[in-house]
Amino acid sequence: MKKVFYLYKSGEFLRKDYSLVLQEKNGNITYIPIEQINLIICFNDITLNKRVLGILNTYSISIFFFNYYGDYIGRFTPKKYSDGKIIVNQVN
């Protein structure tokens, strides 16, 4: 069963081979189990590029962005994404 990945750290998302990595500003590296998640929720400042969006699209992983106060900013939903249940649950 896939799970939701909550991200409270600042840094930069990188694509290394066929995996996703978060490189924090202090130099720590966190590997994200891309095949075990279906949603990423970001509550802090992150930087990402087109290669990261490409791998998220390949694995059908949505990413939601919230500001410091928890207000919804926006989202990235993959091209193949067809289920609106997550969005409805976020609104509720």
Image (cartoon, rainbow, N blue to C red):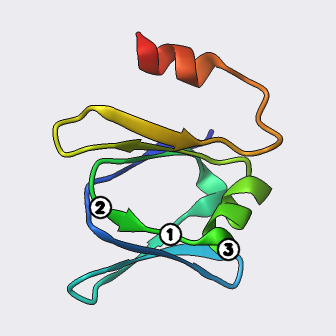
Q: CA distance from mark 2 to mark 3?
A: 18 Å
Q: Amino acid at mark 1?
A: Leu
Q: CA distance from mark 1 to mark 2?
A: 10 Å
Q: Residue 18, image x and y in percent? A: 71, 77
Q: Residue 29, image x and y in percent? A: 36, 83
Q: Are marks 2 and 3 in contact (CB under 8 Å)?
A: no
Residue closer to the observer: 1 or 20: 20
Residue sitting farthest toward the top: 92
Q: Disc 2 designates what residue?
A: 45
Residue occupying image coordinates x 55% and y 63%: 33
Q: How many marks?
A: 3
Q: Are marks 1 and 2 in contact (CB under 8 Å)?
A: no
Q: Looking at the rendered structure, which numbered label has been put on residue 48?
A: 1
SS category of the residue bearing label 3? helix
Residue occupying image coordinates x 29% and y 48%: 43
Quadrant containing the C terminus is top left
Q: Disc 3 designates what residue?
A: 51
Q: In the rendered image of this protein, does residue 47 appear above or below residue 83? A: below
Q: Residue 83, image x and y in percent? A: 73, 23
Asked whether, in this view, residue 4 is left or right of residue 46, the answer is right
